[in-house]
Amino acid sequence: MAITLFMIFLLALPFFLFIILLKQSISNNGNFNHLPPGPPGLPFIGHLRMLMLDNSLLPHIFLWKPSQNYGPLMSLRFGFKPTLVVSSAKMAEAVLKTHDLDFCSRPSLRDAMRLSYNALDLAFSPYTDYLKEMRKLCVVHLFSRVQKYRPIREDQIGRLVEKISQLSVDSNPVNLSEAMMCLSSSIICRIGFGKRYDDGAERSRFHELLKETEAMLSCFSFSDYFPFMGWLIPQKEDLIDVLPRIRMDRDFPFDLTIDHIKAILMNVFIAGTDTAAATVIWVMSALMKNPECLKKTQAEFCPERFLGNSIDYKGLNFEFLPFGAGRRVCPGMRIGVAEVELVIANHLYKFDWEMPTGMNKEDLDFDTVPERFMINRCIVIVTYLLLNCSTSHLVLFQPYPKTLIKGVSNTMHV
Ligand code: HEM
C-alpha cells in the first residue's frame, strides 16, 4: 500500500511542478507590467527563446537590438530571472549613480562562489560591510602603490620594446595580442607575487590558467581550480606579503584567512591581466584601421592634452565607462592606466606600424570574440545587463576584438 501511494505521488509530482512553475511564470509576467517595456516572453523560458533563435549574435548585440524598439531601459526575462537591459548613457547614470546602492551587489552564482572562495574576493562579493572593508583595505594597501610598481612596468615594457625591435629588424610580424597578454600577465605576476613568469613553461602555465578561468567565467561554469597560488614563493614585499602582514599588524574587523588572501590575489591576476591587454589591443586595432589618426597621434602623442577635458574615464561621464562607475568602480584603475599609457606611448613613439604583408586594414575584424565575454567587467560598454533586479545585481561584459592585430613593425623611428 505504501509503495502504491509512493508511486502515485511520484507520478503526480511532475503535474504539481508544472502547476507551480506555470503560476510563477504567470505572476512573473504579471510583474512585468510594473517594469519597463520589453518584448513579450513565453511562459517558463521567457526570452531565452530569443537567445536560442539569435544565437549567431553576440550577447551585447542580441540585447541591444530589441532595445531599439523598446527604449534604453528594457525588461527581459531569462527563465525565471527578470532582467533589465540598459543601453544609454542617461540610463547608465540612473543605474550606476542615482540608484547605485540598489544595483551594486553581485549575484550568487554557484560557480562564481566556488572560484572566489565563497565571495571572499572583491569582484564576486555581494555589497556587504565585508566588501566595503575589503575594498578599503585593498585600495589603501595594494592598489595605491602605483609609483612603487613603476620600475617593474618600465622593465617589462623595455623588454617588450626590445622584442618588437628585434622582430622589426628581421622584418617579422608581431603578434600584438600575444605580446600584450604576455606583458600584462608578467607585470601582474611581478607586482602580485614578486616573480617573473614571462618565459618558459611557467608562463604557458599562467596563460593556460588565465584562459581556463576566463572560459569558466564566461560559460557560467567554473571548476574548482586555483592551485597556482600554492607554488608561488615571494622574494620581497609583494602583494602576496601585504595581506598576511596586515593580518598580523592591523585591527581588521574581519578574520583574514588564507582563503581571503587567495581570493584577492585571484582577482588581481584575473582582473588585472587581460583588461589592460584588451585596452591596448583595441586602441592599436582602431589606429591601424585609421592610418591617418595613427600618424596624427604619433606626431602629437601627448596624453596631458586631455587634462581639463570635460570627459574622462573615471566613472563620472556615463557615455564612457571603461572602468565602470559607482560603488563597484574598478579599484585597480590607476595601475591599469599607468600600464596602458606607458605601453601605448612606447608603441606609438618607437615604431611605425603597418598591416602584415597580404593583409589590409579592411581585414581587421572589430566583431567581438564571444568567449571573451566576462562577468562584471567591460572595456567598451555597449549594454549593461542587469540580471535579476530583485537581488539587484549587475553583469557587465568585456568585448574583445576578433582580429587582433597580427603584427607589424617594419621601420623604427628612434
Ligand atoms: C586597463 C585596465 C583595467 C580595466 C579597463 C578595468 C576595468 C574594470 C571594470 C569595468 C570593472 C567592473 C566595474 C563594475 O562592476 O562596475 C572592474 C572591476 C575590478 N577591477 Fe579592474 N580594470 C583594469 C585593471 C585592473 C587592475 C590592474 C586590477 C588589479 C590590480 C583590477 C582589479 C579589479 C577588481 C578587484 C574589480 C572588482 C571590483 C568590485 O567588484 O568591487 N582592475 N575593472
Image (cartoon, helix red, strand yellow):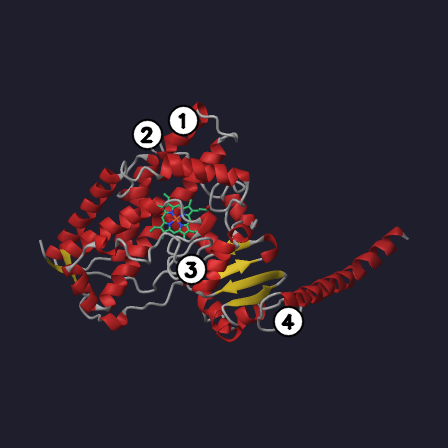
How far separated are the C-alphas under marks 1 and 3?
A: 38 Å
Query: Which residue in the structure is indicated by mark 1?
Result: 245
Residue 235 x/y as whole percent: 30, 29
Residue 167 can be seen in this image:
no
How far separated are the C-alphas under marks 1 and 4?
A: 55 Å
Mark closest to the chain's N terminus, 2 or 4? 4
Residue type at mark 2: give it: Glu
SS of the residue under disc 3 = helix
Of residues 41 and 102, the one drawn nearer to the viewer in this rendering: 102
Mark closest to the chain's N terminus, 1 or 3? 1
Whether residues under marks 2 and 1 lie with C-beta atoms below 8 angstroms apart, the answer is: yes
Query: Which residue in the structure is indicated by mark 3?
Result: 371
Query: Which residue in the structure is indicated by mark 4?
Result: 42
Q: Residue at x 22, y 71 (%)?
A: 360
Label 3 within 8 A of ligand 1 by Cβ: no
Which-is-in-front pick, marks 1 and 3? 1
